[in-house]
Image (cartoon, rainbow, N blue to C red):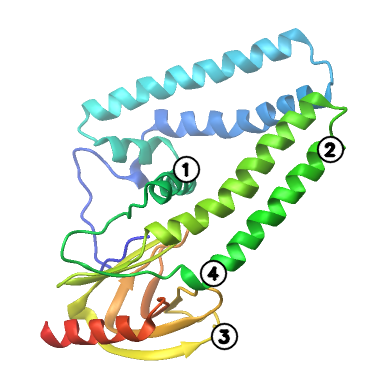
Amino acid sequence: MTGRRPSAVEPDATRGTAGSRDVTTRLLRGVAYASLPAEIVILICLVAGVRIPPPALVASEAVALLLLVAGLVAYRRLRRRGFSARETLGELVPVPVLRLIGHELRLLASLALWVARRRSGVRPGAQVFPHARDQAALMYGFAFVCLVETVGMSYLLADWPVTHAIVLVLDVYSGILFVLGMHAASVTRPHVLTPDALRLRQAAHVDLHIPLDLIAAVRHELRFTHEKTEGELNLAVASQTSVTIELTEPVDAPRFLGGARSVRIVRCHADDGRALYRALTKAVAAG
């Protein structure tokens, strides 16, 4: 989630835009959307032990292979037309899917950084404000509960090896690793203040850049309740925020799946909220 000032974007007539995809790309997406439910049904049947006719399996694999080949051909064609790798993926893959994949990759990367005791996006000379301390006990508690649930399900499904293996993988990844990854992302992605911008982050799904020249007022304000209000963004940690930032004009803070959202008030939390408040006030005054 990257903050920026809303502005009109001139389309590139030589390359097109996401709203002007050619017929081939739209057809490719349509076939993928139509075949995905069938693939899921076949997978569920295989896990449940239901016998599927060989022709149906062959047809399913053939469609998946053709989609893969067609996707590679479309990728190369768009690259030859001048699209970057990121723009090409945006043409072929829906934005929500790309954002979900990116979120999962950031969680895994955060686990690696956490083990290595490193931080992401912190440049030399920048002021760093951690914000994960107050949620640590809660996240570790969630991870322990997930571990107990994984052990329990493993015992209950011991007589069904295939189902046991699938549920074990899902429990370990979507339970233990996901919860630890969320906390690791909060630890390794602190708030960062530079001479020209404030970078606010939350776990692996929020990364908001606010230019200091857009900040109208800063307040140290401890809040434990937050109502969803248009034009406001609350980056609560353990249900609390400690710093409120008012802007002179809206910045774009895209939603989790890519939807546009303009905000003029941002509330965030830091382990030392007063230190963030003082540093930000000083930086805005100096600017």
Cα–Cα span, label 1 and label 2: 31 Å
**Relative to 280, is 259 on the left or the right?**
right
Q: Quadrant of residue 165?
A: top right
From the image, tell me which residue sits under label 2: 155
The kind of residue tagged 4 is: Gln
Instruction: Give the alpha-carbon distance from disc 3 to disc 1, as whole Å.
Output: 31 Å
Q: Which residue lies under the disc numbered 4?
A: 135
Where disc 3 sits, the SS reads loop
Q: Which residue is mark 3?
A: 225
**Sooner in the amino-acid sequence: mark 2 or mark 3:** 2
- Distance Cα–Cα, label 2 vs label 3: 41 Å
Which one is earlier in the sequence, the residue at label 1 or at label 2?
1
- The answer to whether residue 252 shows anywhere in this view is yes
Residue matched to label 1: 101
- Rate crowding at label 3 as few (under 14), some (14 to 19) or many (20 or more) other CA atoms within 10 Å: few
Q: Which residue is nearer to you in this view: 61 or 146?
A: 146
Residue nearest the viewer, comparing 152 with 91: 152
- Marks 2/4: CA distance? 31 Å
